[in-house]
Amino acid sequence: MTARIQPSILSADFVNMQRDVEAIATADAVHVDVMDNHFVPNLTFGLEMVTRVQAVSPIPLDVHLMITDVDRWAPGYAELGVFSVTFHAEATADPVALARRLHTIGARAGLALKPGTDIAPYLELLPEFDQLLVMTVEPGFGGQSFMAEMMPKVSGARAAISAGGLDVWVQVDGGITADTIGIAAAAGADTFVAGSSVYGAENAGDAIAALRVAAEAAHAH
Ligand code: DX5
Ligand code: ZN
C-alpha cells in the first residue's frame, strides 16, 4: 500500500503561505483546513485564500471543510479545480447528494467523521466516496494528541472497502507524527495529514520523508 502524506497548512505561517506550500513540494497534497468558527471553535480562511493557494501550489489541494452549511459552500471549492473536497457527515442531511454534486464538478469527494460519530451508518455510503476521513483529534486545532481509540473505525472502514472491492482512501487527521503514523497505517489508513509534525520540524522535506518511511514500514507488516 502506498502512503500518501498531506501536510496541513493550518500549521504554516499564514503570511508566508507561498513559501510554506513550496516547502512541502515532496508531499502528495496540501491539506487545507477551512474553518468557520461555527462547526468548530476556530476560524481559518475561505474561498479567496484557497484560490490563491491553488494558484501557487506545486502539488494538489486536499480541502477539509470544517464548516456548517456544506451544501451551500462545498461546490464552490470543487469549482476552483482542487483535487479533493472533504466535508463532515455531521454538517449535511444528504451526504450522497453532495458527493454526487462534487463529482459532477470534477473533484474527488471525501466524507469526514468527528471522533464522537459512529461509522456504522456511513459504511454503506462508501461506494459514493473517494475518501473517508477518520478524525484522530477533535477538529478545530493543530497540535493535539493522536486518539488511538479511533483505530477500530479505521480498520472497520478498511475491512468494508476490501470486502466491497472499493477504491476509497482512508485518511487520518490529527496528532500524526513519526511515532503515531505507524499505528494508523497498521490499522489500514493510507492517507495521512500532518500539521505540526511537518511545519514544526527543522526541515519539512525531511519530516515528510520520515513519515513516509514509518507508514510504509507499518504497511509492510
Ligand atoms: C484539525 C485539522 C488538522 C490539523 C492537524 O482540526 O483538521 O488538519 O491541521 O494538525 P496536527 O497534525 O498538528 O494534529
Ligand atoms: Zn484537517
Image: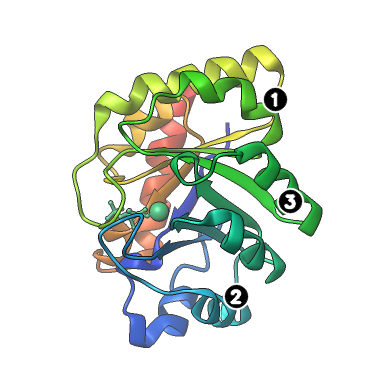
Q: Secondary structure at mark 3?
A: helix
Indicate which disc, 3 or 2, sits on the residue closer to the N terminus: 2
Residue 180's mark?
A: none
Give the x, y percent position of residue 130: 66, 39
Does the beta carbon of the residue at mark 3 sit less than 8 Å from ligand 2? no
- Around disc 1, counting alpha carbons within 10 Å, would you say few (fewer than 14), some (14 to 19), or many (20 or more)? some
- Residue underneath mark 3: 101
The residue at 27%/42% (across/down) is: 137
Q: CA distance from mark 3 to mark 2?
A: 21 Å
Q: Which of the numbered marks, if any, corresponds to residue 166?
A: 1
Q: Earlier in the sequence, mark 3 or mark 1?
A: 3
Residue 175 vs residue 206: left or right? left
The residue at the far right in this view is: 104
Closer to us: 194 or 80: 80
| Mark 3 or 2, closer to the camera | 3
Q: Quadrant of the C terminus?
A: top left
Q: Which percent across, then down, holds residue 133?
A: 47, 40
Classed neighbour count for the residue bearing mark 3: other residues with Cα under 10 Å, few (<14), some (14–19), many (≥20): some
Q: Are marks 3 and 2 in contact (CB under 8 Å)?
A: no
* Image-quadrant location for residue 79: bottom right
Where does the image place residue 167, in percent across and percent down from the top left? 69, 31
**C-alpha gap between disc 2 and disc 1:** 29 Å
| Quadrant position of residue 173 | top left
For image coordinates 31% across by 34% down, the residue present is 115
- Amino acid type, residue under disc 2 in the picture: Gln
User: In the image, what residue type sits under mark 3?
Assistant: Arg
Image region (quadrant) for ligand 1? bottom left
Q: Residue at x 49, y 80 (%)?
A: 49
